[in-house]
Image (cartoon, helix red, strand yellow):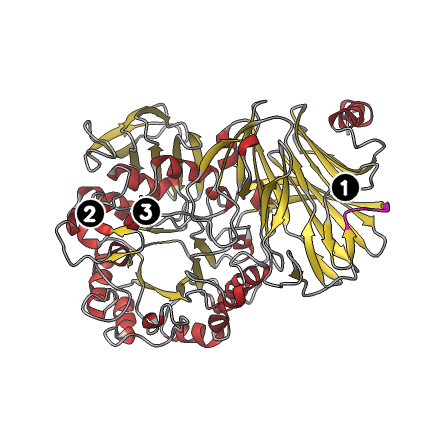
Amino acid sequence: MNKKKLLILFFILPCMALAQKPDRGLWKSVVSDYSPDSSIFASAYLTHRKTLALDIYVDGKHFLNIDSIGLVTDAGNYHSFRKVSKKRASAILEAQTPLLWGERKGAIQTCNLQSRSLSLKRGSLCFNLYVANNGVAYSFSTYRLPMERICRETTRYNMPCDGSSWSIPANFESYEFLYREQPISRIQDANTPFTFRLDNGLWGSIHEGEIDNFPEMTLVRDGDLSFRTWLSPSADKEHDFAIPIANSTWHHSPIRTITIGRKATDLTNSTFVPSLFRSRVHDSIPLDHIRPLKYIGIWWGMHLGINDWTPGPRHGATTENAIRYIDFAAANNIDAVLLEGWNKGWETWGKGQHFSYTEAAEDMDIDSVCRYARSKGVEIIIHHETGGNWKEYESQLDSIFSWCIAHDIHAIKTGYAGGFPDQELHHSIVGVNHYNTVMRKAAEYGIMIDVHEPIKPSGWNLSYPNLMTGEGVRGQEWNAWSEGNTPSHICTLPFTRGLAGPTDYTPGIFDINYERIKGDTNVRKWNMKDARECRVHTTLCHQMALWVVLYSPWQMAADLIENYEGHPCFRFFRDFDPDCDWSEMIDGYPGQYAVVVRKAKQQYFVGAITNEKERDIEIPLEFLEPGRSYRCTIYQDGEDAHSETNPTSFQIKEKEITRETTLKVRLAPGGGCAIHIR
């Protein structure tokens, strides 16, 4: 450590810490460290109340204070510490994102780790502090704590000033809400990732990683600019926040993460969260079938009301329809077909939800469909809707996955659209442990998973690369039977939900106004509205751009295949490669616009979207290799395009470019642009 750092550490920072909050008084250092580039300093210490606090400074500015870090259990409070161990451990983490897939394959970032043990009245806690060039994180490892239940967490996040924030409300059953932009001082509660911009110009996003045997965390107001952690409760009636601990002598808390930036794109381009998690892929996990893919599926018709999940004259997942979709996939360079509603049990919906995961409906010959798909080189994604009956599903996992392997099925979309048994909550420790059980068991069989109605992504895909993607967002289906999603909501997703992990938004609707079903008196009403009264609130080119902007290694063209046949814009999806090697958000701002580029082998794909405002954007191509010329195809909004009045107007342009080129593109209100460079 150089003299400048020593001066700051021993003379200036203690004074800054004392000046920030009056209750700190005499304090005792626990651990502190700089980021590798010295721009971020984090200091954990005990206050005069013997509670643990953490201060974070960025470029000399006070960025965040976290105090009262600890737990309350049925055996006592574990946020008042007696002493700090003399021994402390240090490490440098050079983490690498998984090579199988990811937004930035092989991206390496150094992260400094400091650990120290804190003594309690009974037992001890090991506090771990992580500091990187673009973030700070912390976690607990617990030792010999005589407890059976954690009742609540006491940690509180304190902002140094007001600012703007982007979040959804705290909810323990769903993440499917429209994102809202509000002053930090107006937020009552929020789920994570909680993204904010302080009035001092710094950006941040609070989240958590590797949630295991622990409920998810949300934030609830505890003062003008303070938020206390609020854990998803168990159904245990004797404890409001009862959380049964499987092993009372050893437990790891989730890693609480704070991603930091000087501008909004610093958050989306950060590799901080992946840098915290080392890949723990076991040698016994089969990896041969784990891969990114493009897919279509028997899905959108049910949401529109054209088809049913249950057998009958309007059944969607029939043998005949499956063959049609397989043929379309094979002819259009598409890897897989999703079969939703293929199995028995949909008729039990609302009557306990008892599905069979190995028996097909009477009009679906699953054996012949699987054989036909193999002959065409197309993967089958089988759908396992549980209706929330996780106990029944979990009890059959070995037999279910064995059946899948016997049918050469290596891809499953799970669903939990219903209440859990015994009044347990989706995001409670019960839900967390079930989702993780399915993920780990599927890994043993080499089966890929796409989870709908999930717990929020928290880094597990780095250890289990078979966990490919997940919903956890108010996605496309809401456009089929509600007032729909706004362009502002979609433009917020890369800066919020997208920071947590891959997002299965199911983009790519071409029939924006549902022209195909207008006048169809047989389209049934369900849920909130008649499907004929709903629509997608973006332009067609915006929908195309989402294949690039919203990252998922499984990317779906979600519309009916009839709406793609012969459409010149569908060439972009045929050319698109979801197996990207490198990604960057070139420009963007939450709720307003986003411009993203992804490289896949020797091709580049660019996507740009805007909110309800018309926007002229410039796309510098400095990411291209020097000394080479490229051909690009630009799919952009037509001159008269508008998301509400003329959403399907488009134009296609061909252009020769080099890395010195700057593309200038007009985005219509609610519009977008998709570019293929080769």
- Identify which residue is drawn at 78% across, 55% down: 76
Q: Is residue 316 above or below residue 540?
A: below
Q: Nearer the viewer, residue 642 or 242?
A: 242
Q: Callout 2, which amino acid?
A: Tyr
Disc 3 versus disc 2: distance between alpha carbons? 15 Å
State which tag comes first along the sequence, 3 or 2: 3
State which tag comes first along the sequence, 1 or 3: 1
Q: Is residue 269 above or below residue 579?
A: above
State which tag comes first along the sequence, 1 or 2: 1
Q: Position of residue 153 (x, y in %)?
A: 68, 49
Disc 1 versus disc 2: distance between alpha carbons? 56 Å
Q: Nearer the viewer, mark 3 or mark 2?
A: 2
Q: Is residue 357 above or below residue 245?
A: below
- Mark 3 and mark 1 in contact (Cβ < 8 Å)? no
Is any part of residue 202 visible from this angle?
A: yes
- Identify which residue is drawn at 79% across, 42% down: 51
Q: Callout 1, which amino acid?
A: Leu
Q: Which residue in the structure is indicated by mark 2? A: 514
Q: Which residue in the structure is indicated by mark 3? A: 507
- Dot 1: few (<14), some (14–19), or many (≥20) neighbours within 10 Å? many
- Identify which residue is drawn at 21% across, 46% down: 511
Q: Callout 3, which amino acid?
A: Pro
| Tag shown at residue 52 | 1
- Identify which residue is drawn at 72% across, 44% down: 69
For this view, does 132 lie left or right of residue 431? right
- Dot 3: few (<14), some (14–19), or many (≥20) neighbours within 10 Å? many
Is any part of residue 624 visible from this angle?
A: no
User: In the rendered structure, which segment of residues is drawn in magenta?
Assistant: 78-83
Disc 1 versus disc 3: distance between alpha carbons? 45 Å
Q: Nearer the viewer, residue 150 or 364?
A: 150
Q: Quadrant of the N terminus?
A: top right
